[in-house]
Image (spheres, grey):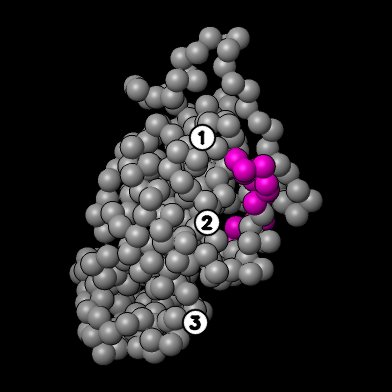
């Protein structure tokens, strides 16, 4: 994908707040007496703070999200479990008003949302403390955005997924499991649509072409919990290997570039950085090496 990247700074001390950057939001430079107040977060009975603590800063593809709610700029409340009752996927977009690539990406996200909102829900959460709901509402109105927008309260997602660049998008399936995440702005609505299509179960099944990577240890035993990327020129699907070590992807016929993105502790991969599975369905087996301590 074409990426437009912008760095953000995480303050890990004291209150764990996002650092100010040169040219940052005006609220950061206003006197305290005139600064806009920060809205209180919404906490519902469905949320489990201990579950978020358990994620720590190790969130990745395969992580199962605790339920969460967030106030939205239109006066409503977005709740993950509620959104997944009638949607197959939820896209969580992390952004800030001072981030040019984030604002450049929004029209593409809006167009993709309009075409996919019966299957894919979207929530955009600002990581900037100064982006109050009133500021966010103004952004939504100026850009004509219709999907819910709120705040990443307490930098919950930012910290759990070690976000160091925005925009970052996190895609969640019906089981509240992260199936894809990446940083950098999409350059077209089609990139979002390709991403959704690659991760919608019904569409993958209808396409009917299977590609698989089996990851095994030195003894030939399957290694579960590995993250494998199946990529076209415009989108990537990330698949977690099952108990037998198989990462299975179904998609349109294509020469998919395959990358080993993450391995469980105790393993490393020293083979080819980029393998290719051919157009009419293909499979390969990858042997992992024991990690060198």
Question: In the rendered structure, are the residues bearing label 3 and label 2 in contact, judged by CB atoms less than 8 Å apart?
Answer: no
Q: CA distance from mark 1 to mark 3?
A: 37 Å
Residue shown at 36% from the left, 54% from the top:
108
Label placed on residue 202: 3
Q: CA distance from mark 1 to mark 2?
A: 18 Å
Q: Is residue 75 on the magenta stretch?
A: yes
Q: What SS does tag 2 mark?
A: strand
Magenta region, residue range: 63-78
Tag nearer the camera, 1 or 3: 1
Q: Position of residue 161 (x, y in %)?
A: 48, 48
Q: What SS does tag 1 mark?
A: helix
Q: What SS does tag 3 mark?
A: helix
Which residue is nearer to you in this view: 244 or 9? Answer: 9
Within 10 angstroms of label 2, few (less than 14), some, or many (20 or more) residues? many
Residue shown at 55% from the left, 61% from the top:
121
> Which image quadrant for residue 279?
bottom left
Does residue 20 appear anywhere in the picture? Answer: yes
């Amino acid at each position: 994908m074409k990426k437009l990247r912008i760095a953000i700074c995480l303050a890990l001390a004291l209150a764990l707040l996002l650092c100010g950057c040169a040219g940052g939001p005006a609220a950061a430079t206003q006197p305290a007496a005139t600064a806009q107040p920060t809205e209180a977060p919404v906490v519902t009975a469905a949320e489990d703070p201990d579950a978020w603590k358990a994620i720590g800063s190790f969130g990745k593809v395969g992580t199962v999200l605790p339920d969460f709610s967030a106030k939205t700029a239109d006066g409503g409340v977005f709740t993950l479990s509620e959104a997944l009752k009638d949607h197959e996927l939820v896209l969580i977009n992390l952004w800030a008003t001072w981030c040019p690539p984030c604002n450049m990406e929004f029209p593409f996200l809006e167009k993709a949302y309009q075409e996919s909102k019966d299957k894919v829900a979207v929530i955009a959460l600002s990581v900037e403390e100064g982006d109050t709901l009133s500021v966010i509402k103004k952004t939504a109105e100026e850009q004509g955005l219709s999907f819910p927008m709120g705040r990443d309260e307490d930098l919950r997602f930012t910290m759990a997924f070690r976000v160091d660049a925005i925009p970052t998008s996190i895609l969640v399936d019906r089981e509240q499991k992260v199936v894809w995440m990446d940083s950098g702005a999409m350059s077209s609505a089609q990139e979002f649509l390709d991403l959704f299509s690659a991760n919608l179960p019904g569409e993958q099944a209808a396409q009917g072409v299977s590609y698989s990577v089996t990851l095994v240890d030195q003894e030939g035993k399957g290694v579960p919990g590995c993250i494998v990327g199946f990529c076209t020129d415009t989108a990537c699907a990330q698949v977690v290997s099952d108990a037998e070590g198989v990462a299975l992807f179904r998609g349109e016929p294509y020469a998919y570039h395959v990358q080993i993105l993450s391995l469980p502790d105790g393993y490393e991969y020293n083979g080819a950085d980029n393998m290719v599975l051919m157009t009419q369905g293909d499979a390969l087996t990858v042997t992992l090496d024991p990690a060198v301590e």
